[in-house]
Structures are given as C-alpha cells and as structure tokens.
Amino acid sequence: MPSKADIIIIGGGVMGCAIAYNLAKAGLKPVVIEKSDIGGEASGSNGGGVRQSARNLKEMPLAMESIQIYGQLHEELGMDVEYVRQGNLRLCTTDEELEAMRQAVENQKKVGLELVMLDRKQVLELNPHVGDKIIGASYCPTDGHVNPFLVTYGFFLKAKSLGARFFTHEEAKEIRMQKGRVTAVVTDKNVFETDLVVDAAGIAGRKVANMVGLDLPLRSIFSEALITEAYPPLFKQMVGHAKGLFYGRQTAHGSFFWGGFVGTEQFIYREGKPLFHYIGPAISQMVIDFFPVLKDLNVIRMWSGLIAQMSDAIPVLGFTQEVPGFVFATGFSGHGFGLAPVIGRLISELILDCKTSIPINDFCYGRFQNGSDHECSCPGNAACTTVTAVCPNKREWLKSI
Ligand SMILES: Cc1cc2nc3c(=O)[nH]c(=O)nc-3n(C[C@H](O)[C@H](O)[C@H](O)COP(=O)(O)OP(=O)(O)OC[C@H]3O[C@@H](n4cnc5c(N)ncnc54)[C@H](O)[C@@H]3O)c2cc1C
C-alpha cells in the first residue's frame, strides 16, 4: 500500500536535512529517504570549513547569508554545533601564489566580501606557528569552521521533532511520472506517492536526475582527509594552502583535521582503483612544512570522501521547466557545507512560495541546455524557471488543507 508524502527528499546529507528542517518548520511533512545513514557520505566526511573566501563569485551572496545563519544556528537547533568564526588564512609560499591571491582578493572585495592580503609579519601576528616558507596570505576574518556531524545531526533531529520522517537504509530506485509530472518515488522497501521530489543526493545527484529523464554534468572526485591526536589549543582559524592543496583546522576536542588534494598527482591505480598510500603522507608533509610545531603529532585515522563536482564547479538548484515536481539541490562541488543553512532556507522558500529571498538564477538547470552564458528566465526575482506550471506553491496548498 503506497504511503503519501507532501514532499520526498532523496538524500539525508546536510542538504536534505536542512531542507527537511525548513519545510517542517513551515508546517509541511517532508519524507527523507537515505540509502545509508544520516550524513553517511560527504556530509560526514568533510572538513567543516565555513568560508566565503575563494568561492566562485556567483556563490558569494549565498555564502555571506549562510554565515549569518551559522551565527545563530545553535539557538535555532537547540545545540552547540562548535561554530568558530575566527577567520581563514590562505597561505602563500611563492611570489606567483601571492600575485594570484592579490588578484583574487580584489575580485572578492568588489562583491562586498571583507578580506585582506597580509605579509609574513602580519600573518605571524595572527598565527605565530606558521613555518619559514610562508611569505603572505589572504585573510577573511568572518570565515570559520564548524563540526559537520553536529550540524547535520542538528538539522536531522530538529526536522524530526517538527514532523519530518526519515527512512534510512532505504534507497530511492525509481521516480514515477504521469503526463511528465512526478507522481511517486519507489524505494527498495516502499512506494511513496508525492507531487514533489527534491534531488539532494550528493554524488548520486546525476543518477537521481536520470530517473526523470534529465542529465547533469556531475562527476565524483576523490578527496582525502585525516585526523590527528589531540593537541593543546594552538589556533582558531581555518588555514590552508593558497591553491587549496591542503586545508584544515583544530577541532574543539584538540585534534587537527587536515584534508586536501596534495599527493593526488602520485596516485597509483591498480585494477581501476586508486591506492591511497601517498596522499595522507603528502598532506602530512605539507602540514609539517607549514606548521612545524605539529611534526610529532600522530595521525589517528584517514579516510576518503567523494565530492559531487559540477562541470562549472557551482551547484544546480531549483525547479526545471522539463519536469514539474522535480527540484535540484545537488552538485556542491566540494564546498557545500558552508552553504548548507542557506540552501535549506532557499529551497524551502522556493517550494513554499515559488521565489527565493536571494536570487538563485545562476544555479539553474537550464544553463546546461543553453550554454554557460545562459541567463535563467526569472525576471526581477529569484525564482529560477518558476512558472505556474512547475511551481507547487505549497504554502497556498497548506492553507487549503
Ligand atoms: C573530504 C571532503 C572534505 C570537504 N570539506 C569541506 C569543507 O571544509 N567545507 C565545505 O563547505 N565543504 C566541504 N566538503 C563538501 C561538503 O561535504 C559537501 O558539499 C556537502 O556535504 C554536500 O552535502 P549533500 O547533502 O549535498 O551531500 P551528501 O552528504 O553526500 O548527501 C547525499 C546523500 O544522498 C544519499 N543518497 C544518494 N542516492 C540516494 C538514493 N538513490 N536513495 C537514497 N539516498 C541516496 C547518500 O547516501 C548521501 O547520504 C568536503 C567534502 C569532502 C568529501
């Protein structure tokens, strides 16, 4: 016997949970289908960096709003999420890196982000532990970091307390349609009738889009991470290499999280599978070069995560003209955690009212059909491709029941 659901969200990562929370807060009863555990993929394997700096400029308004929400998230979710807003240092070791960083800083300042270039002396004033190689850095004082497990779980628990239902270890296998519209989601255990499906499936975002006959230029790319034993408090900034080869932070517990891509050039593939032996040591060596004081710290655990990488490295968000009832919230391209609170809010605004408080036009699905210069047709407001035909207007519907 099929169950009925106001909305089905496929994916119980931070995005699915944040969207479920916002919808449940508005009175809807979303159902989240998660094939593993809550936060079992990228949302449970990431660095917790909450940054605005070094983003695609199109994402900047979202990132700036997201840190405002992060600032009061502990109150909203009723739990400490270990949010620390003490800046992000992107460290340079060569003149070439410094010059590229200077240019990037100027571009980001033009869209309203507060950040500065620092010389070595100024870097040392903020973080006296950097090694001799560091000649300068960019510094964004309002960037920071958070505990990703607590954030994802916080959204999950709060959504659940407001009436959202979560089905874990259950995989969405098929999306049924009638006359081009979404009508049901079939899992390996249930059939849910619904007129609205959110694709929050992370690296599987493309597979889920394929279920309704759409396709995305999304591929998964590999990223390695490690955690050390605890160390007395050293610094509170998020830190990393100018080109993002490695990045990290000290956690509230004292351990250091380090992640990155350095060493991937030394990948050895055997029978199509990468051997990861080189990456952890390569990241560790870079950490030791940049922060020599940490040279004797033991690594406790290493893991790898997969990033949902879009061809243009920005997410795909919102409705599509092609399939009424299908909503994208995927493809966060390795830096989505910082955006999660604002994505939860914007996607729920779209579903409830067919418009968003911050424009999301730049992230529409239409850009893949019509070329990268394509402007989504959303005159004057945010609701990308939202026309009556695809807009479910769930707030009006709520009033009518
Ligand atoms: C190692 C690493 C470090 C990172 N560091 C940072 C960082 O410091 N800062 C930052 O901002 N971002 C970072 N990111 C990126 C960030 O983790 C992601 O952008 C974010 O977590 C994406 O959340 P999501 O909910 O879209 O995806 P996910 O967390 O991957 O959730 C998608 C969920 O969908 C489920 N799913 C998929 N298909 C189905 C199906 N058919 N049926 C049911 N369930 C399904 C999956 O099991 C998964 O749990 C990092 C990523 C990695 C891998």
Image (spheres, rainbow, N blue to C red):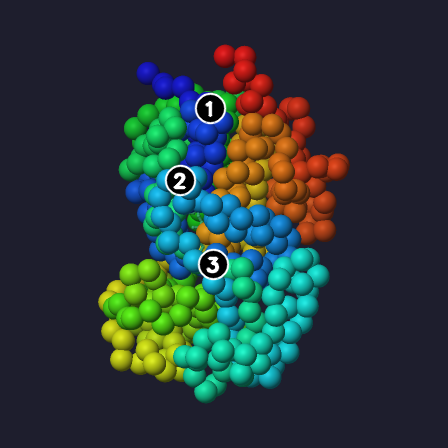
Q: Which residue is mark 2?
A: 77
As drawn, the label of residue 27 is 1
Specify whether 69 is left or right of 390.
left
- Quarter of the image for residue 201 reads top left
Q: Which residue is mark 3?
A: 85
Instruction: First in sequence, mark 3 or 2: give its number.
Output: 2
Asked if 207 appears above or below 334 in the picture, the reply is above
Percent of width and height locating residue 401: 50, 12
Percent of width and height locating residue 314: 57, 52
Q: CA distance from mark 3 to mark 2?
A: 18 Å
Kind of element beneath mark 3: loop
Specify whether 243 is left or right of 276.
right
* Residue at image point 40% right, 82% down: 289
Kind of element beneath mark 2: helix
> Callout 2: few (<14), some (14-19), or many (20+) C-alpha neighbours within 10 Å?
some
Q: Nearer the viewer, residue 346 or 245?
A: 346
Q: Amino acid at mark 2?
A: Leu
Instruction: First in sequence, mark 1 or 3: give its number.
Output: 1
Q: Amino acid at mark 3?
A: Arg
Percent of width and height locating residue 205: 47, 44
Instruction: First in sequence, mark 1 or 2: give its number.
Output: 1
Q: CA distance from mark 1 to mark 3?
A: 32 Å
As drawn, the label of residue 246 is none
The answer to whether the residue labelled 1 contacts the one labelled 3, judged by CB atoms less than 8 Å apart, is no
* Residue at image point 46% right, 52% down: 337
Residue 376 visible to an observer of this rendering:
yes
Quarter holding the N terminus?
top left
